[in-house]
Image: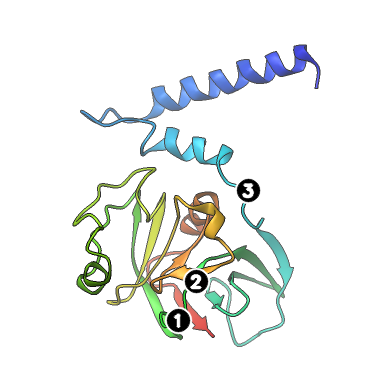
């Protein structure tokens, strides 16, 4: 890349950042780098991860718009229909924290706050009792809550954990991928978790 091209790229990036800041709703005492459109934009530069891709889908029992998670393959599939699905890399529950079953997306949140469940606090008393949503929050940019369980499909501030078994049962995605899934899935979406 030439210096001239790099300079033009810098100018475009500065313009995009300025537009995002101007478009963001004003929130008193909030850092725009922590949550909101600017934080969403900045995640583009933070995450290598396992790249999402459209794949051939040979499982007709799962219908268009459903989410299927294979914990053994560490992949999440959003079924597009017509024999196709979007495949995302995910982090899954570590040994002793895996689960399977069928849930529905019961709610969705952007830059969600996090309150660790009592069982997690018992295992990890060093954790904060509550954490406001933002870049440093372990739930990342978006969360899809699964039924009345404590499990979620959520972003992560640790993109290097994608493809690993490290969570307490939640399904982790890169922030870019969870934003994409969040925009596709609706409340009521069926989620099937397979071992």
Where residue 149 appears, as percent x and y from the top left, is: 30, 77
On the picture, is 82 further left or further right than 49?
right
Crowding around mark 3 (Cα neighbors within 10 Å: few <14, some 14 to 19, many 20+) is: few
Which image quarter: residue 3? top right
Which x, y percent locates residue 4? Answer: 76, 11
Mark on residue 42?
none
Q: Mark 2 or mark 3, which is nearer the start of the sequence?
A: 3
N-term mark: 2 or 1:
2
Task: Check disc 1 and report its element: helix, strand or loop.
Answer: loop
- The local secondary structure at tag 2 comes to strand
Residue in the image at 70% along x and 76% along y: 57
Task: Answer left or right for 189 relative to 88.
Answer: left
Q: Residue 69, located in which quarter of the rendered image? A: bottom right
Quarter where residue 36 is shown: top left
Report the front residue among 124 and 13.
124
Question: Crowding near pointer 2: few (<14 within 10 Å), some, many (20+)?
Answer: many
Residue at x 67% of width, y 55% of height = 51
Residue 46 vertical position relative to residue 189 in the rendered view, above or below: above
Look at the numbered discs 3 and 1 and tell me whether their residues touch, using CB distance below 8 Å: no
Q: Quadrant of the C terminus?
A: bottom right
Q: Which residue is mark 1?
A: 98
Q: Looking at the picture, tell me which residue is in the foreground, 180 or 97.
A: 97
Q: Is residue 134 left or right of residue 102?
A: left
Give the labeled residue for mark 3: 48
Residue 159 spot, x, y in % from top left: 53, 53
In this rendering, the answer to whether 81 lies above or below 1 is below
Answer whether labels 2 and 1 touch (C-beta < 8 Å). Answer: yes
Q: Which residue is mark 2?
A: 92
Image coords of residue 33 (percent x, y) = 39, 32
Q: CA distance from mark 3 to mark 1?
A: 25 Å
């Amino acid at each position: 890349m030439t210096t001239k091209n790099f300079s033009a790229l810098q100018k475009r990036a500065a313009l995009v950042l300025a537009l995002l800041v101007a478009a963001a709703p004003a929130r008193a005492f909030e850092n725009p780098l922590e949550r909101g459109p600017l934080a969403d934009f900045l995640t583009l530069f933070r995450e290598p991860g396992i790249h999402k891709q459209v794949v051939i889908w040979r499982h007709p029992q799962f219908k268009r718009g459903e989410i299927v998670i294979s914990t053994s393959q560490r992949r999440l599939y959003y079924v597009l229909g017509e024999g196709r699905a979007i495949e995302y890399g995910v982090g899954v529950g570590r040994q002793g924290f895996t689960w399977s079953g069928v849930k529905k997306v019961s709610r969705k949140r952007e830059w969600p706050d996090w309150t660790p469940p009592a069982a997690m606090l018992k295992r990890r008393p060093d954790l904060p009792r509550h954490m406001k949503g933002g870049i440093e929050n372990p739930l990342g940019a978006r969360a899809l809550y699964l039924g009345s369980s404590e499990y979620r499909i959520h972003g992560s501030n640790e993109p290097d954990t994608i493809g690993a078994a490290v969570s307490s049962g939640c399904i982790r995605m890169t922030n870019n991928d969870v934003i994409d899934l969040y925009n596709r899935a609706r409340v009521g979406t069926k989620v099937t978790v397979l071992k």
